[in-house]
Amino acid sequence: MTAEDHPSATPDGPVAVLANPTAGRGRHRGLLAPLLSRLATGGRPVRLLEAGSADGAEAACHAAVAEGAAALVAVGGDGTVHRALQAVAGTGIPFGPVPAGTGNDFAADTGYPPDPLAAAEVIAGALRAGRSHPVDLARLTSPTGPPRWYGAVLAAGFDAIVNERANRMRWPRGRRRYDLAILVELARLRPRRYKLRLDGEPHEVDAVLVAVGNCPSYGGGMRICPDADPTDGLLDVVVGGRLDRRTLVRVKPSIYQGTHVRHPLVHSYRVRSVELAAEGITTYADGERSLDLPVTVTAVPGALRLLR
């Protein structure tokens, strides 16, 4: 798609709102009406998008953008944001995340308040003022699938493997399923051979943790790429090498503070693009199941206009 092909916001078009009623285990469900009212103070009509599935949500966002929405707002967590980003990335149509999920890393790392109503007020104020700020996104491509965009972090190591196992499990439900998946994968833990090209420079490493960050955090506040900045035009690549079970369990809690990068087996790189290959890994972007390795990740400066 060329720049001329991109949809453009219609001056009197509506603010399209994608809301995930199950985000954050439904704890913000009663806030939707006041959130829509708050967004309406931005001076534009507000249109709530209808979607019955994640794929349906993404399609509804694409349709709203194609029909001339003035802006797109996502009410939910990082997964809801991820779906919305596919429609607005590279278009110039402004976007606002209202953090109402279990993990709200993209909204937090780009400066939105954690309270959903306060975030909606920030977005409404930006709409009234006609104000938006550019931030970078990461563009993800592979030999087999269409390109994807993400805003926060791509997981391509142990955490991606745990997510993949948890998503295949039917029992137990909720957080316990993820905890059980961690225990199973810890018992099976082994370094995998990764081939990386960092801005064209080849590297081969044995590693258990690999993350590519446009923003610092994933998983609800884990600062896996603590120095990542979504305005610098670069990606932060963090690689945890041959960590054994005991060391990984000891290092994992320090990810919340971002101090894991001080461990001698953890290495960080800052690049414009990274090619990443390994056997049997399905990546997770913004916490959502994404493309199988191999992939290429490229920083795209200013790919998103944030209502802030």
Image: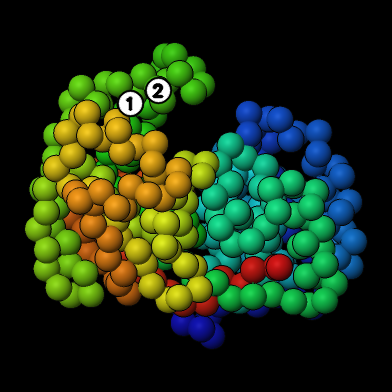
Q: Secondary structure at mark 2?
A: helix
Q: Where is mark 2, residue-wise? A: 179
The label on residue 182 is 1
Q: Position of residue 244 (x, y in %)?
A: 17, 33
Work out whether residue 212 or residue 171 is closer to the camera in this orientation and state it: 212
Q: Secondary structure at mark 1?
A: helix
Up-down: is 271 above or below 204? below
Up-down: is 76 above or below 232? above
Work out whether residue 271 or residue 245 is closer to the camera in this orientation and state it: 245
Circle 2 crowding by C-alpha within 10 Å: few under 14, some 14–19, many from 20: few
Up-down: is 184 above or below 190? above
> Which image quadrant for residue 87?
bottom right
Circle 1 crowding by C-alpha within 10 Å: few under 14, some 14–19, many from 20: many
> Which image quadrant for residue 34?
top right
For residue 243, say whether it is visible: yes
Q: Image point 55% across, 72% down: which residue? A: 135
Work out whether residue 290 or residue 248 is closer to the camera in this orientation and state it: 248
Q: Amino acid at mark 2?
A: Asp
Color encoding of the figure: rainbow
Q: Image point 38% across, 41% down: which residue? A: 254
Quarter of the figure with the C terminus: bottom right
Q: Position of residue 277 (x, y in %)?
A: 17, 55
Q: What is the C-alpha distance between the residues marked 2 and 1?
A: 5 Å
The label on residue 88 is none
Q: Image point 59% across, 62% down: which residue? A: 110
Q: Amino acid at mark 1?
A: Ile
Q: Position of residue 202 (x, y in %)?
A: 11, 68
Asked if the residue under mark 1 is in contact with the one under mark 2, i.e. CB atoms within 8 Å, the reply is yes
Q: Image point 65% across, 64% down: which residue? A: 95
Work out whether residue 44 or residue 155 is closer to the camera in this orientation and state it: 155
Left or right of residue 295: residue 47: right
